[in-house]
Image (spheres, rainbow, N blue to C red):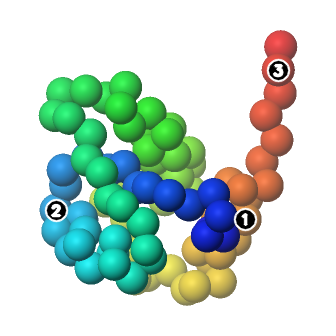
Amino acid sequence: MPASPRKTLTDDRGQEMAEHEQLSHRLSFQVCFADPHSPWERGTKENTKGLLRQYLPKGTELSTYTQHELNVVAHRLNARQTTLC
């Protein structure tokens, strides 16, 4: 992600963020955490997880995919068009 729009990352309190201090330092942005039992604070994350589930079901082991396959999924999600009714 380009540095200009990147300022913070908000995540829940899962173990995947155990090394958040190193991530924050390496990427030069602040890592924030949503309050427990406050899903509205992490709406984008929950929406993105739902979109990813179309391609990678819950519990999928990512190491079974090549980088190219993961890039294809990322491209499809980033290039998707939304329609307004």
The residue wearing badge 2 is: 15
Instruction: Give coordinates of residue 57: x percent, y percent.
Output: 43, 54
Residue 21: give its label: none
Instruction: Give coordinates of residue 6: x percent, y percent.
Output: 56, 60
Which is more N-terminal, label 1 or label 3?
A: 1
Q: Residue at x 37, y 25 (%)?
A: 40
Local packing at callout 3 (Cα closer than 10 Å; few below 14, some 14-19, many 20+) is few
Residue 45 lies in quadrant = top left
Disc 2, SS: helix
Left or right of 25? Residue 78 is right
The residue wearing badge 3 is: 84
Tell me the quadrant of the picture where the C terminus can be found: top right
Q: Residue at x 58, y 85 (%)?
A: 67
The residue wearing badge 1 is: 75
Which is more N-terminal, label 1 or label 2?
A: 2
User: Alpha-carbon distance for marks 2 and 3?
Assistant: 37 Å
Disc 1, SS: helix
Disc 3, SS: loop
Local packing at callout 2 (Cα closer than 10 Å; few below 14, some 14-19, many 20+) is few
Query: Which is more toward the observer, 8 or 67?
Result: 8
User: Alpha-carbon distance for marks 2 and 1?
Assistant: 27 Å
User: Alpha-carbon distance for marks 3 and 1?
Assistant: 21 Å
